[in-house]
Amino acid sequence: MASNNFSLSIIVPMYNEGENVSVFYEKITQILVSHNYDYKIICINDGSKDDTMERLRQLANHDKRVKVINLSRNFGKEIAMSAGLNYSKADIVIPIDADLQDPPEVIPLLIEKWKEGYDVVYATRKKRDGETWLKKATAHTFYRVMGKVTRFEIPADTGDFRLMTKQVVDALNQLPEQHRFMKGLFSWVGFKQTSVTYYREPRYAGKSSFNYWKLWNFAIEGITSFSFAPLQIATYLGLLIAVLSLVYATYLVIATFTLGNPVPGYPSLMVAILFFGGVQLITLGVIGEYIGRIYNESKRRPLYLVKEELNIDEEPKSAKLKIIN
Ligand code: UDP
Ligand code: MG
């Protein structure tokens, strides 16, 4: 077996995962120990409302390799994961979901690929068990749209489950933005990337905290964080409408001369007014999405607040963090 003289950090964002904590811990520890890795498991309690934190406390008490960061409230998965990245100092880092949807068995495969000389090895899902066709279809559309509107490639059917080297993690830690669409940032930083495929399991217990409204907002986040295309659409839509209305005006002039004007054009007037009203509101909304993001970035708040740390002996690398005592 190849040498294992590297350190590994597993990053686990957790929101209401009380039922999954111990099964997850057992399963992943078994795999990490059997491969003799030098590892740490960094769990981020993202403001869970159930007993996740109590369970993590018990684990941290009897296993010093379990590190816990307790955030002051729910900040969302992207930020919880960023917190974990800030805290990890290992040679390689792997974020993974706590619900066992990302099978820990894949970790050794990721590590084997990394040994071939890659900086990022992402895990691409082959099949999504336990997810409705609607979720699969929306996810599919999302990746295709993202692929079209951004200038770099975001691999399809790939979540946050991946291996990254220290160099990549350092790069991510330097990105200052508040709106952290991780899938996009992972691709944006570049480096030598490759993939392994795996079968996505259904959630072990509990239910997904991502409903369609959240996913829709997630998609908007992704697109506005990495593309101006929606703003440009307004320009082209405006041009198209201008051209169409010129054509229509010409037709009206000709029609009035040749056929006369028996009925004054009330319906066409209403249609034009409503249509333009709609187009203007949509484009204002699109501009608003971007201005809102500029506003959020300009506040320069810390990304997250930490309420408590367990088994953490070193300070995090990032200056973005503030600890409440
Ligand atoms: N998660 C989190 N904060 C949140 C929502 C989710 O840390 O606000 C974690 C959750 O505990 C899990 C991972 O993110 O470990 C993926 O969440 P989920 O299974 O709900 O998403 P899905 O698998 O449906 O994409
Ligand atoms: Mg899940």
Image: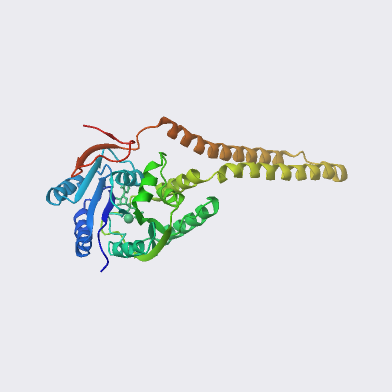
- The residue under the point 54% across, 50% down is 149
- The residue at the far top in this view is 299
Quarter that holds the C terminus: top left
Q: Which is more toward the observer, 267 or 48?
A: 48
Report which quarter residue 115 is drawn in: bottom left
From the top left corner, tell me how far across and down residue 78 is, in percent: 36, 46
Q: Is residue 5 or residue 125 the one in the foreground? A: 5
The residue furthest right is: 258
Residue 80 occupies which quadrant of the picture? top left
Q: Which quadrant would residue 124 be assigned to in this image?
A: bottom left
Say which residue appears at 52% left-offset and 54% top-offset: 145
Q: Is residue 77 left or right of residue 48?
A: right
Measured as percent of width and height from the top left, residue 242 is found at 71, 41
User: Residue drawn 28% across and 44% down?
Assistant: 87
Image label count: 0
How far from the left and from the top, in percent, is residue 195? Answer: 40, 62
Relative height, residue 285 to residue 203 (above, below) = above
**115 versus 285 height, above or below:** below
Whether residue 201 is visible to the viewer of this picture, yes or no, is no
Q: Is residue 26 visible?
A: yes
Q: Colour scheme used in the picture?
A: rainbow
214 or 305, nearer to the observer: 305
Seen as rendered, the residue at the extreme left is 62
- In the picture, the quarter occupied by the N terminus is bottom left
Which residue is at the far bottom?
Answer: 1
* Rendered location of residue 74, percent (x, y): 30, 41
